[in-house]
């Protein structure tokens, strides 16, 4: 067994142990398990929400994005902080309403705010369908990290199984508390690894940090700026940054809600959004590593392998093992957060068990079933959900007008039929433009879907007001809490 | 953000969004140039789009405490 694999397995066990450490006794009700009784302060909240920023995409994908798109990849840095500018104002509103009415999920919030069970079901269904491939991406990402570092597919598959059996166990035991304690470890390790790799790789393989860009300027100057033509041009850059920022700003990803609702006060959320952008700026480090990949790795067939291919050239095996553990943490910790979102949507908004106990049972069963479904697909047919993954972000962004309709105005300006019509048309546009070759001038299909979604939402609401000019009524969620 | 004092939030917040989305269209900034050893567009992405957000929100927070003092705050520390 190689040094890297031994360290990787030790890392998996340590992360799981920290997950169990999150609670002395297992959680026994959904509110305690999902939002930790709404008691988290600034430090824990910061780590929980920072944990959502650094996933396997950041670890493997960011450096790879430079290799495949050049400077257009820079869009991946500012969209999260730009989204925080809006979240600074609306997250406290979400938190207050959620606490007052006992909401635990994004679908609870929209169902209660619009007084529509249908809307709650549709939002929950979209959440589960679009988050499952994202969960599978984290699982296959973990296997890929170990496989790339050890050069052995069996080790990669074994690591996937060990890691995700342990993730299921600690998530069932600790819920959001487990995500919080593992986030402490993950974020500390990520920062160390990002700094070490972004110094060691440019210095060891390209002569220094700024030397990288001087060499790129000589041999491939077009990689230093966003092109005005081609597949990844300025329109691609701007529209992807816009749709991604809108997704963060209006919390369209359901797995961002449990963390948001676990804060002990609205002030904690506001303080958190002030300081999170500093952490997000560290995304610049894998971007620099991506440029080293452009110089050093000729004919790079797999852009996602860039970070680990360079790390294995520049670092000794024991340090490569630490890098692999950081990568594993970026898969295990966000996966735990995804499982909490998927299972609570299923239990609260889809199955709707009558008693609180039955609801918690459905929730725990969903954690097991969702993980094993994603794990088996990851092992047997890793590309099975690839098409669905293409829709995850653009598809969930279609919830933005419905969320904004509740939060941006002093009273509800939209009613459920308008919100539902907008979501339905937006999803259809996104699906068609993703899978049918149509020239959209490199503009993000999510943004196009959102524009059509907005027009339809406003039109349906206008027609509805002519027929029934009643003010929207808010009805609390009726399921057990 | 609505109300009489909203303009100052829109004005200051708008600068960040303007810089993030507009500078990429300027060839003086989005070109094969290096500034202090890094691509110039990287600086313009990193600074207004990420690093400046913290001081911006810090200013917003000071204004919020003055304009809309929150009556039901419960503190910031972990329980």
Image (cartoon, grey):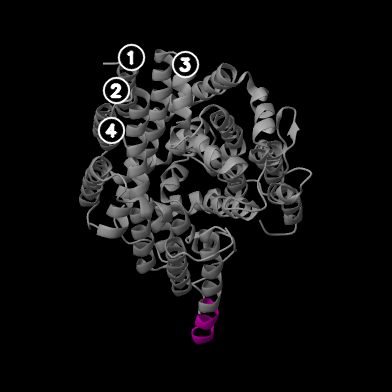
Q: Chain of mark 2?
A: A
Instruction: State if disc 4 and disc 1 touch (CB < 8 Å).
Output: no
What SS does tag 3 mark? Answer: loop
**Residue at image location 42% in from the left, 51% down from the top:** A254
Q: Position of residue A265 (x, y in %)?
A: 51, 41
Name the foreground residue: A220 vs A239.
A220
Eye-nearest disc, 1 or 4: 1
Eye-nearest disc, 4 or 3: 3
Other-residue count near label 3 (Cα within 10 Å), few / some / many at <14 / 14–19 / ≥20? some
Q: Real-space Cα distance between discs 4 and 3?
A: 24 Å
Whichever of callouts 1 and 3 sits on the residue coming sooner in the sequence is 1
Disc on res. A415: none
The residue at which mark 1 appears reads as A3
Q: Real-space Cα distance between discs 2 and 1?
A: 16 Å
**Residue at image location 34% in from the left, 27% down from the top:** A146
Q: Position of residue A233 (x, y in %)?
A: 62, 52
Disc on res. A315: 3
């Amino acid at each position: 067994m190689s040094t890297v694999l031994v360290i990787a397995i030790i890392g998996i066990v340590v992360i799981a142990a920290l997950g169990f450490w999150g609670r002395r006794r297992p959680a026994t009700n959904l509110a305690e398990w999902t939002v930790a009784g709404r008691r988290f302060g600034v430090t824990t909240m910061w780590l929980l929400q920072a944990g959502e920023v650094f996933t396997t995409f950041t670890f493997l994908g960011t450096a790879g994005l430079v290799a495949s798109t050049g400077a257009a990849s820079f869009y991946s840095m500012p969209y999260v902080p730009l989204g925080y500018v809006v979240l600074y104002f609306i997250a406290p509103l979400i938190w207050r309403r959620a606490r007052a009415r006992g909401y635990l999920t994004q679908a609870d919030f929209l169902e209660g705010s619009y007084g529509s069970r249908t809307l709650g079901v549709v939002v929950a269904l979209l959440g589960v369908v679009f988050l499952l491939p994202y969960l599978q991406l984290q699982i296959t990402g973990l296997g890929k990290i170990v496989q790339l570092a050890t050069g052995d597919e069996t080790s990669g598959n074994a690591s996937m199984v060990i890691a995700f059996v342990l993730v299921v166990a600690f998530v069932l035991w600790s819920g959001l508390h487990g995500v919080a304690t593992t986030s402490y470890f993950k974020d500390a390790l990520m920062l160390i690894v990002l700094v070490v790799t972004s110094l060691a790789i440019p210095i060891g393989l390209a002569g220094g940090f700024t030397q990288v860009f001087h060499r790129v300027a000589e041999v491939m100057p077009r990689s230093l700026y966003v092109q005005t033509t081609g597949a990844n041009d300025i329109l691609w850059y701007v529209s992807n940054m816009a749709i991604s920022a809108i997704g963060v700003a209006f919390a369209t990803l359901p797995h961002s809600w449990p963390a948001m609702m676990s804060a002990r006060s609205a002030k904690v959320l506001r303080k958190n959004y002030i300081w999170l952008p500093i952490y997000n700026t560290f995304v610049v480090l894998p971007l620099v590593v991506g440029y080293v990949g452009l110089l050093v790795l000729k004919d790079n067939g797999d852009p996602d392998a860039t970070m680990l291919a360079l790390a294995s050239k520049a670092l000794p095996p024991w340090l490569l093992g630490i890098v692999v553990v950081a990568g594993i943490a970026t898969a295990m910790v966000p996966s735990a957060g995804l499982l909490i979102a998927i299972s609570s949507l299923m239990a609260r908004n889809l199955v709707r068990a009558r008693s609180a106990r039955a609801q918690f049972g459905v929730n725990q069963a969903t954690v097991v079933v969702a993980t094993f479904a994603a794990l088996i697909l990851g092992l047997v047919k890793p590309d099975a959900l690839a098409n669905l993954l293409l829709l995850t972000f653009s598809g969930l962004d279609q919830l933005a007008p419905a969320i904004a309709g509740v939060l941006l105005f002093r009273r509800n300006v939209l009613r459920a039929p308008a919100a539902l019509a907008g979501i339905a048309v937006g999803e259809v546009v996104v699906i068609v433009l993703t899978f049918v070759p149509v020239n959209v001038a490199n503009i993000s299909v999510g943004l196009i879907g959102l524009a059509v979604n907005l027009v339809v939402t406003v039109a349906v609401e206008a027609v509805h007001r002519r027929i029934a000019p009643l003010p929207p009524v808010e009805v609390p969620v009726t399921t057990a809490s | 953000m609505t109300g009489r004092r909203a303009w100052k939030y829109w004005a200051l917040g708008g600068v960040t969004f303007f810089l993030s989305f507009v500078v990429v269209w300027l060839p003086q900034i989005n070109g094969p140039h290096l500034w202090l050893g890094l691509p110039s567009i990287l600086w313009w992405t990193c600074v207004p789009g990420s690093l400046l957000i913290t001081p911006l929100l810090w200013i917003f927070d000071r204004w919020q405490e003055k304009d809309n003092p929150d009556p039901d705050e419960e503190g910031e520390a972990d329980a």
